[in-house]
Image: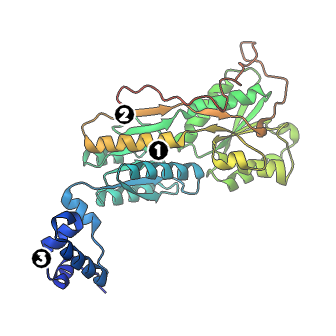
Amino acid sequence: MNSAGIKDVAALASVSIGTVSNVLNRPQLVAPETVKRVEAAMEELSYVPNEAARQLRLGRSRTLGIITPDASNPFFADVAVAAEKAAAEAGYTVIVGNSNGSDEREARYLELFEKLRVRGVLVSPVGESTPRLSQMRQRGTPAVLVGTSSDAACSSVSVDDAAGAEIAVDHLVHTGRRRLAFVGGPLTMRQVSDRFTGASRAVRKYAAVSIEHIHLREMTVEEGREAGRGLAQRPAADRPDGVFAANDLLAIGLAASLFTETRAASPEQMGLVGYDDITFAASSTLPLSSVRQPTELIARAAIDLLLQEAEDSGRAPRHVLYQPELVIRASTVASPPLVKSSSGREPADLTRANSPHRRLRKMDDPHY
């Protein structure tokens, strides 16, 4: 059955198509009795206005697109919710697409959003999507990267992931850990690559501290469980005594397999730090130390940048960078003695610098 159109409404209400259009867009210009008659005809015919067509006629969409790489990850879900809230406050609705870690799915969503003539797109890219985004921008659809930065003609809002990884590893070293492991992957994800870079950079500051990379295909709880089971099967002397997981989901899986299922280790024997500080990090059976990202600030800054570019397509790309903070909980119980750095000095006291109450800072951006 075909849906009713504006011509059907006009015929049933015995008015012109222009009158129906005025009822939809400028009801104050139409007599109240006529408005009631048109609305009654719409209800009888189950007429649904074509909002996309209306916005195209007006030349300005009130819809934004959001592409997230993993809708099941609470961090990305929180960013999407915060972005939707900020967009609603500005009078926009959002359509959310989940690329599920697939570059192909991401490309399809970008193509769809461009066809829908959305006002702009927020993207947490799977890999290197900037050439495609630059082309979209040139054709009139601005895009802002979320959670990662780029040198291309595309604005971004991100957190200094390398710095976040560095403070996580510094903390593990400060609690006496010498044999470290970075658990995460794939490295084709910019965030994972940056976090591994920061972790490696931190290790180089200390003598007698090493780090291994346990490569994973996905950043899920189950992948973390499997990684934990693999560590549990090693002889105790061959296990790391400090683990930095590339996100909290992995860390939660690691904790479940190592500390609960196999009981191969305890936080005293193997310190564990995650990344993102999702809600479950604090409320899990073993409260998890984690690097916190300011999701609300990230989302609002990204929406602001996107709407500014939608209003002025000639603006130069801007890059907003937030500094993360380390939230210390029970998963990193100290295991002395402390490890000396390559300079022979004890590691710096990180307690004050990385307090959960340390204020988040946004890097100065003259364009923002």
The residue that disc 3 covers is 16
Q: Confirm whether residue 190 shows in the render.
A: yes
Kindly report which numbered mark, 3 or 2, lies closer to the viewer in this rendering: 3
Q: What whole-number distance in Å separates the C-alpha atoms at marks 1 and 3?
A: 44 Å
Q: Nearer the viewer, mark 2 or mark 1?
A: 1
Foreground: disc 1 or disc 3:
3
Q: Nearer the viewer, residue 25 or 353?
A: 25
Mark 2 Cα shell of 10 Å, populated few (<14), some (14-19), many (≥20): some
Disc 1 marks which residue?
A: 299
Closer to the N terminus: mark 1 or mark 3?
3
Q: Amino acid under label 1?
A: Ala
Mark 2, residue position: 318
Q: Which mark is residue 254?
A: none
- Residue 229 visible from this viewpoint: no
Please give left or right for residue 249 compared with residue 36 in the image: right
Identify the residue shown where x is 72% and y is 37%.
Answer: 181
